[in-house]
Image (cartoon, rainbow, N blue to C red):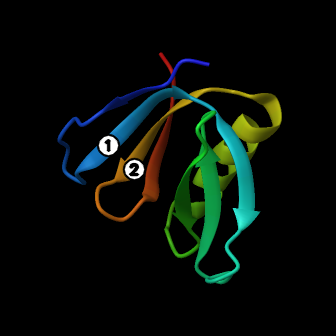
């Protein structure tokens, strides 16, 4: 798998992990009602999806598809929080 990271500045200040697949999804033992842990790529960098996000359902569906079927996406991580804010189809 090839993963690239870019620091494009957008309104939400996201860092993008392009052509990335999610390698694990687990409940966070420290904050089970707030976030889900998500590992991206072979190096298993850990990020989070907030259960309180208005986009939670869409984000978790795409993350699950990526995990189960190794589907790659462009994943936008909010700077300084490690929260996944966007998961977009690879074009």
Residue 32 relative to residue 5: left or right: right
**Is 19 located above or below residue 15 in the figure?**
above
For the residues labelled 2 and 1, say whether their Cβ atoms are less than 8 Å apart: yes
Secondary element at image label 2: strand
- Residue, x 37% and y 37% (percent of image)? 16
Task: Give the labeled residue for mark 1.
Answer: 15
**Residue 49 placement (x, y as % from top left):** 55, 62
- Residue, x 69% and y 27% (percent of image)? 71
Badge 1 local density, few (<14 within 10 Å), some, or many (20+)? many
**Residue 25 placement (x, y as % from top left):** 72, 55
Judge by depth and name the residue closer to the eye, 55 or 81.
Answer: 81
Labels in figure, total? 2
Q: Earlier in the sequence, mark 2 or mark 1?
A: 1
Judge by depth and name the residue closer to the eye, 4 or 61.
Answer: 4
Location of residue 56 by image quarter: bottom right
> Which dot marks residue 33?
none
**Residue 91 placement (x, y as % from top left):** 47, 15
Q: What distance separates the C-alpha of mark 2 from that of mark 1?
A: 5 Å
**Is 39 located above or below residue 8 in the figure?**
below
**Is 78 located above or below residue 5 in the figure?**
below
Outermost residue to the front: 43
- Residue, x 40% and y 50% (percent of image)? 77
Secondary element at image label 1: strand
- Residue, x 62% and y 49% (percent of image)? 39
Badge 2 local density, few (<14 within 10 Å), some, or many (20+)? many
| Quadrant into which the N terminus falls | top right
> Which dot marks residue 77?
2
Judge by depth and name the residue closer to the eye, 79 or 60.
Answer: 79
């Amino acid at each position: 798998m090839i993963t690239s990271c870019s620091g494009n500045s957008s309104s939400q200040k996201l860092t993008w992990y392009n052509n990335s697949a999610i390698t694990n999804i687990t409940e966070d033992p420290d904050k089970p009602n707030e976030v889900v842990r998500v590992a991206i790529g072979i190096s298993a960098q850990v990020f989070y999806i907030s259960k309180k996000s208005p986009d939670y359902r869409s984000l978790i569906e795409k993350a699950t598809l990526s995990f189960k079927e190794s589907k790659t996406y462009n994943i936008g991580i909010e700077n300084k929080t490690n929260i996944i804010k966007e998961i977009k189809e690879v074009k």
